[in-house]
Amino acid sequence: MSLRFWALSASLSIALLVSSASALTPDGEALLELKAAFNDTKRMLRSWRRADPNPCGWTGITCHFPDLRVRSINLPYMQLGGIISPSIGKLQRLQRLALHQNSLHGPVPAEIRNCTELRALYLRANYIQGSIPPEIGELTHLTILDLSSNLLRGTIPPSIGRLTHLRFLNLSTNFFSGEIPNVGILGTFRNTSFVGNLELCGLPIQKLCRRSMGFPAVLPHSDSFDSPGIPQIATKRTTHFLNGIIIGAMSTMALALVAVLGFLWICLLSRKGKVEGEYIKVDKQFVQDIGTKLITFHGNLPYVSGEIIKKLELLDEEDIVGSGGFGTVYKMVMEDNNVFAVKRIDRNRDGSDQIFERELEILGSIRHINLVNLRGYCRLTLAKLLIYDYLALGSLDHYLHEHGQDEQPLNWNARMKIALGSARGLAYLHHDCSPGIVHRDIKSSNILLDRSLEPHVSDFGLSKLLVDDDAHITTVVAGTFGYLAPEYLQNGHATEKSDVYSFGVLLLELVTGKRPTDPSFIKRGLNIVGWLNTLSGEHRLEEIVDEKCGNVDVEAVEAILDIAAMCTEANPNDRPSMNRVLKMLEEEIMSPCLSDFYEPHLDI
């Protein structure tokens, strides 16, 4: 009996040891929580598996040995969306976090304070929002902090000044405001660490800080007036006098503010009337249930509403075909095999659903052969979904830079057809819609291709529709780094001319076959525009044109590069309108060779 008991105990002990050996480490569990918060549509993190005993062999992960604690996370250029999970704080021995050049949004989690050994934090070129958590000042070992080219705002926390080991700081191209704290290590960094934040001021950037209403931020205390020959009563009268001036100024400003708001309200009402009168009337049908609402535009979704809603509710990860700055895109196949694209909106916009749906109707009323057709909108209990036509070949970005080129490379004529159609779609938005629509996010991933390589511009109007109305947030969220016009980055004001700049970058992308953020440009401190200017000045066209274009006439290349150069002029006033760009492209491209455009017949 005793032997049997000990044998059973030994078996249980062995089983427990095997179980504990095969269980994923706590750091591995934290990484899986991090992965769950990411939007990894490209499956870059497919090696992150719960079945592994530890995460040390996972993509982008290195560990300390022998304790197998995570030492670094290195995932730049991975096309990751989503947010940074607060679970990052569970990785207490993390020394390096590099998530730059992705599409992450949301805040920097305050829980990062728990990564007490962190030495390098790279989050540049994402869509990170909110303010810098003051808890970053608790990361006493931090030597590198790069938060540039994001959507961060608010003041710079003085706690950063306590980071005595900090050697590199880059907070440029955000929306920080107020005075740069001249405390501790912060006082040693100069202009390059803060450039591109228009509302920042202070000694490091040699910009005086304006005080409210022209007075000092803090009025002198009465004690400061105490001096021989000046009675105390005079101090009190002076203080009351200044207070009277301030109160009077505030009253005047309040009255002025009321008048301005009233004027803007009248303008808004008149604008609304203009929009309702000049856009095409939308035929819509909708069905509404508790928590669910379906609206279809143009009456061209020939299905019973319940059938559409059922299909929408069944969409899951297996149906994902892409993601963008505003949400995830799914492929929805109906019973008759018709296919639609469904964009799930990840971002919430403050305001009533009625206003949101009214603005959607305007977008649904726009019809053009080179614009993606918005079919409808569905509000489910937990999601807002937009229903579009599905384009068989996907995005130009995917086809040009990924596997599409291996199957059917785009020759020169095909690329010019795409350029011409894209220009027509964008010119229609600028000049034929009333009021005109500024796209704000022209890029190759927003140009979708049908089976005959006809381009269709997508996501027009979404930046204004889905992002908070605050002008600062509306700006860069709507754009993608590499395509943004200089003035758009600097002042946050989107115009038709900033769209023209982005289209010029798209032209260069078609000619070169390179993304605007190609690592070869960044290593040299350039973007695609600067790179092209360098090579064009040296007449090195052979290095510019993508070899997959085939045989191309030199004069044709130079003509397109000239158009692109005009579109990407630094001064927006020097750029042509999209109507002018379209006319120049038509004059250059609409020639006898048009019939030679590459027209593939693909079974996809």
Image: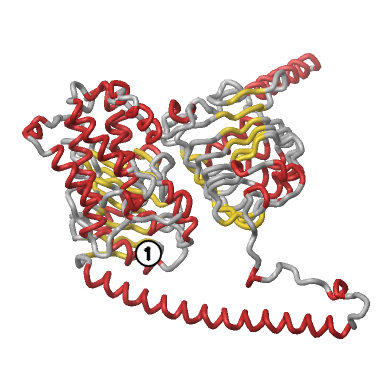
The residue indicated by pointer 1 is 356
Could you tell me residue 595's position as x and y percent?
Answer: 7, 33
Could you tell me residue 236's position as x and y percent?
Answer: 83, 83
Q: Using the image, determine if residue 308 lies above or below residue 482.
A: below
Query: In which quadrant of the rendered image does the N terminus lie?
Result: top right
Q: Is 60 on the left or on the right of 21, as rendered?
A: left
Residue 330 seen: no
Q: Using the image, determine if residue 137 lies above or below residue 537.
A: below
Could you tell me residue 212's position as x and y percent?
Answer: 64, 69
In this rendered view, identify the residue nearer to me: 594 or 459: 594
Colouring mode (rainbow / by chain / secondary structure / one colour) = secondary structure
Q: Is 595 on the left or on the right of 334, as rendered?
A: left
> Which amino acid is tagged 1?
Phe
The residue under the point 67% across, 79% down is 246
Could you tell me residue 178's position as x and y percent?
Answer: 63, 58
In this rendered view, identify the residue nearer to me: 144 or 401: 144
Q: Residues within 10 Å of mark 1 (few under 14, many from 20)?
A: some
Q: Is 161 on the left or on the right of 557, as rendered?
A: right
Q: Using the image, determine if residue 601 lies above or below residue 125.
A: above
Residue 493 sits in which quadrant?
Answer: bottom left
Residue 51 sits in which quadrant?
Answer: top right
The residue under the point 49% across, 27% down is 523
Query: In which quadrant of the rendered image does the C terminus lie?
Result: top left
> Which residue ends up furthest to the front in the rendered image?
229
The residue under the point 54% across, 39% down is 124
Residue 581 seen: yes
SS for tag 1? Answer: helix
